[in-house]
Amino acid sequence: MNVVIEAQGLQVSVGPQVLLRDIGLSVTAGERVALVGRNGAGKSTLLRTLTGFNGAGCVTRGSLRVLGTEVAAAGTDTGSGVLRGLRARVGQVHQGLHLVGRLRALDNVLIGGSARHTSGWAWLRRWPASERLAAQAALARVGLASAGHRRTDTLSGGERQKVAIARALHQGAPLLLADEPTASLDTEAADEVVSLLSAVASERPVTLICVVHDLDLVPRLADRAIALRRGMVVADVTVDAHTPALLRGVLK
């Protein structure tokens, strides 16, 4: 099987503070994995570490290989060709979304394809017709076919989350990371986002790593759940209907 993520004895620290310790895991292509745990357990830190983001801290021990790239060896310089190449192959749906509010929804989706162009097209927003058509198709896939012309900051929270998913789809990345994608959404919008993420992960297929706060959502988003406590893995289980109750017992 094609291994997408491989961590062995991984430790991540900020100065003297150890955020993740002795993490060992292997994720194969097409898996859908939920990261669960209480606040401060290390879920978001692990997610950010997968793309070498500085704010996640530094790998101080062990190894982490993502899509064939050794993350520690890639360094922390955002100008690094190795690091930039890795991030181009990782789609992300953040809690903060990282969308540009003043731009149209379509322009935000088009940014997902910027790694495919080395010219100034991305900066000048002079995208080829093929990119525009593909971005429009991604918006249509998430149910926002008619919203492409609207400024992103005029959209609802659920609609903005869908734009972020469309951007990741347009990027065409084999690995998709989602950090609490239903945070701050009402029940109806959260339900739509969960259904959409699950569907697109199955259709591509992509490998999905998702930080999940609501344990009842785990069976809908993942086929495997990894629980963290104080920066360490305390459970790694196959998901079924009984998993939420099991995880509550592990994490209490």
Image (cartoon, rainbow, N blue to C red):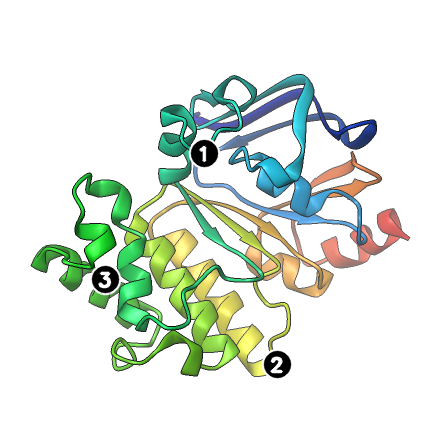
Which residue does the numbered mark 1 point to in the structure image?
A: 78
Q: Considering the numbered disc 2 on the image, is that residue within a helix, a strand or a loop?
A: loop
Residue 161 higher or lower than 15, as above or below: below
Q: Position of residue 242 (x, y in %)?
A: 74, 56
The residue at the point 70 percent across, 64 percent down is 216
Depth check, front residue: 155 or 140: 155
- Give the number of the mark in front: 1 or 3: 1
Q: Considering the numbered disc 1 on the image, is that residue within a helix, a strand or a loop?
A: loop
Q: Earlier in the sequence, mark 1 or mark 3?
A: 1
Q: Position of residue 228 (x, y in %)?
A: 77, 41
The residue at the point 41 percent across, 26 percent down is 80
Which residue does the numbered mark 3 point to in the structure image?
A: 135
Q: Quadrant of residue 179?
A: bottom right
Label 2 is placed on what type of residue? Asp
Q: Considering the numbered disc 3 on the image, is that residue within a helix, a strand or a loop?
A: helix
Label 3 is placed on what type of residue? Ala
Q: Position of residue 118 (x, y in %)?
A: 19, 38
The residue at the point 56 percent across, 21 percent down is 72
Q: Quadrant of residue 126?
A: bottom left
Left or right: 96 as drawn, with respect to 236: left
Which residue does the numbered mark 2 point to in the structure image?
A: 186
Query: How far is the residue under mark 1 from the one under mark 3?
Result: 26 Å
The residue at the point 45 percent across, 72 percent down is 160
Few, some or many residues within 10 Å of mark 3 (<14, 14–19, 20+): many
Depth check, front residue: 4 or 122: 122
Label 1 is placed on what type of residue? Thr
* Mark 1 touches mark 2? (CB < 8 Å): no
Few, some or many residues within 10 Å of mark 1 (<14, 14–19, 20+): some
Few, some or many residues within 10 Å of mark 2 (<14, 14–19, 20+): few
